[in-house]
Every structure is written in structure tokens, then in C-alpha cells.
Image (cartoon, rainbow, N blue to C red):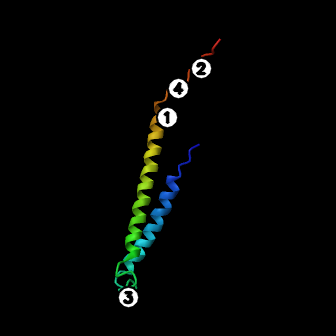
């Protein structure tokens, strides 16, 4: 079976992280909004963290797919001789 859970997880985290980081970037000038969080733009920083995690997961998934394809190409082909 060719199912790697890292691919959809990486895509989901990257997408959510990008949306959150863009939201944090666009509201960066609103200092009143970030007063409860001690002035830290939590949306921007956590969006970047989520995006980075998603990118790492996607990189691992693509690396595993490439290694599996290389291993498949290097496996010896079965001979069609019958055993008697």
C-alpha cells in the first residue's frame, strides 16, 4: 500500500500556517488587538511555526517517495524459471 500520512498532514499544516501567518502580517499594525498577548503577534509567529512544520512533513514525505522509487528500481526482477 502506498499511503504516507506525512503528505496530507504536511499539506494541512502548511495551508493553515500560511493563512494564519498572512492574517498576522495583515493585522500587524493593530497594537490594540495584541495587547492581551503582551504585544506579541501570536498569529504571525504561530503561523510561521505551523508552516515550517508542514514544510518539514512535506519534505519527509517527498523524500520517502523518492527513496521508495529508487529502491523499487534497484530490486532484481524475478526470473521466470520453473522449479522442478
Q: Looking at the picture, tell me which residue is in the foreground, 69 or 59.
A: 59
Q: Residue at x 47, y 65 (%)?
A: 15
Mark 1, residue position: 72
Front: mark 1 or 3: 3
Mark closest to the chain's N terminus, 1 or 4: 1
Tell me how far mark 2 sits from mark 4, CA to CA: 9 Å
Front: mark 2 or 3: 3
Q: Secondary structure at mark 2?
A: loop
Front: mark 1 or 2: 1
Mark closest to the chain's N terminus, 1 or 2: 1
Return the mark for residue 80. Answer: 2
Q: Residue at x 50, y 54 (%)?
A: 7
Q: Are marks 1 and 2 in contact (CB under 8 Å)?
A: no
Tell me how far mark 2 sits from mark 3, CA to CA: 75 Å
Mark 4, residue position: 77
Q: Residue furthest bottom?
A: 32
Q: Looking at the picture, tell me which residue is in the foreground, 81 or 20.
A: 20
Q: Residue at x 38, y 73 (%)?
A: 44
Q: Callout 1: 10 Å neighbours few (<14), some, many (20+)?
A: few
Q: Secondary structure at mark 4?
A: loop
Q: Are marks 2 and 4 in contact (CB under 8 Å)?
A: no
Q: Is residue 24 above or below residue 32?
A: above
Mark 3, residue position: 32
Q: Residue at x 42, y 60 (%)?
A: 53
Q: Are marks 2 and 3 in contact (CB under 8 Å)?
A: no
Name the quadrant of the N terminus: top right
Mark closest to the chain's N terminus, 4 or 3: 3
Mark closest to the chain's N terminus, 2 or 3: 3
Amino acid at each position: 500500500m502506498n499511503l504516507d500520512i506525512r503528505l496530507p498532514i504536511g499539506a494541512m499544516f502548511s495551508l493553515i500556517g500560511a493563512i494564519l501567518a498572512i492574517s498576522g502580517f495583515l493585522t500587524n499594525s493593530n497594537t490594540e488587538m495584541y495587547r492581551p498577548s503582551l504585544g506579541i503577534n501570536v498569529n504571525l509567529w504561530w503561523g510561521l511555526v505551523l508552516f515550517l512544520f508542514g514544510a518539514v512533513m512535506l519534505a519527509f514525505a517527498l523524500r520517502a517517495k523518492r527513496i521508495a522509487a529508487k529502491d523499487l528500481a534497484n530490486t532484481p526482477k524475478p526470473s521466470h524459471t520453473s522449479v522442478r
